Image: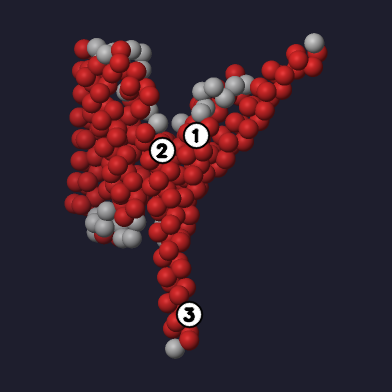
């Protein structure tokens, strides 16, 4: 009886840790989803998409849709929190894309509409192939590898920001709250994937965690360096 109780307690603690990691990832990801709001306030206020690009939001939408599909029980068991957070993300991306299309010039409007159709066509093809060609186990592997490729591509985008920070020696284009939210989201889902022994979750989010730490270290270094450069003339004078 004692051993059964210990097993039950251990199992409950494991479930609590897994749920906590998934919920933490959901909460921190919300910060990432709302971060473009100031940009779209400006677009609405000026009634123009100006020189902004809608491509990041299209790509984010496709990424969210793939993650939703992977997180559903028809593909994977026990990772529903992956589907919930990306459902919220997909809604945000659709709103952003809609606003962009409304206020874009005719050429951008046409291009964005065409690419949006393309996003749904690609997603529809992934669903069709995974349902028609694979059983449940192989379906998870098929969608999982697509999911890993999509997430790694998304996590690779901060490399451009990191390069810009090093070149300019300024953190102006790398806001702390975004870097911190990226790190928290990645480390939370890395923990979630590790607890569930899900390779397709913990590998890309592990890479995202390393990139998140790198951004935070660079932010601390160049912010401190900027302060030193600013205060140096005070000592000289």
- How many tags in the picture? 3
Q: CA distance from mark 2 to mark 1?
A: 8 Å
Q: Which of these two is toward me, 228 or 21?
A: 228
Task: Return the residue nearer the eye: 208 or 88.
Answer: 88
Q: Mark 2 or mark 1, which has the lower sequence index?
A: 2
**Closer to the camera, 78 or 123?**
78
Give the residue at x 41% y 65%.
15
Q: Quadrant of the N terminus?
A: bottom left
Q: Residues within 10 Å of mark 1 (few under 14, many from 20)?
A: few
Going from N to C along the chain, the mark reached first, 2 or 3, is: 3
Gap in angstroms between the C-alphas marked 3 and 1: 41 Å
Residue 31's tag is 2
Rendering coords of residue 210 (x, y %): 55, 42
Residue annotated with mark 1: 177
Secondary element under disc 2, as helix, strand or loop, is helix
Instruction: Tell which tag, 3 or 1, sits nearer the viewer.
Output: 1
Location of residue 162 (image quadrant): top right
C-alpha gap between disc 2 and disc 3: 38 Å
The residue tagged 3 is 6
Q: Quadrant of residue 149?
A: top left
Image position of 49 (left or right of 22):
left
Whether residue 138 is visible: no
Residue 122 falls in which quadrant of the image? top left
Q: Are marks 2 and 1 in contact (CB under 8 Å)?
A: yes
């Amino acid at each position: 009886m004692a051993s059964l109780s210990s097993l039950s307690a251990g199992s409950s603690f494991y479930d609590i840790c897994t749920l906590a990691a998934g919920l933490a990832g959901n909460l921190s990801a919300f910060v990432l989803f709302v971060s473009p709001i100031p940009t779209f306030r400006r677009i609405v206020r000026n009634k123009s998409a100006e020189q902004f690009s809608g491509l990041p939001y299209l790509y984010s939408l496709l990424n969210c849709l793939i993650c939703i599909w992977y997180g559903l029980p028809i593909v994977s068991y026990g990772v529903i929190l992956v589907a919930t957070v990306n459902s919220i993300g997909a809604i945000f991306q659709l709103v952003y894309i809609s606003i962009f299309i409304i206020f874009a010039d005719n050429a951008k409007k046409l291009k964005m509409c065409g690419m949006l159709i393309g996003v749904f066509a690609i997603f529809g093809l992934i669903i069709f192939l995974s349902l028609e060609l694979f059983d449940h186990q192989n379906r998870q592997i098929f969608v999982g590898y697509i999911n890993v490729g999509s997430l790694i591509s998304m996590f690779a985008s901060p490399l451009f920001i990191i390069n810009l920070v090093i070149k300019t020696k300024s953190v102006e284009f790398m806001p702390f709250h975004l870097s911190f939210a990226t790190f928290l989201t990645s480390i939370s889902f890395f923990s979630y994937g590790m607890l569930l022994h899900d390779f397709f979750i913990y590998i890309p989010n592990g890479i995202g965690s390393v990139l998140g730490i790198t951004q935070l270290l660079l932010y601390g270094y160049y912010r401190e360096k900027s302060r030193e450069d600013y205060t140096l003339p005070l000592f000289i004078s």
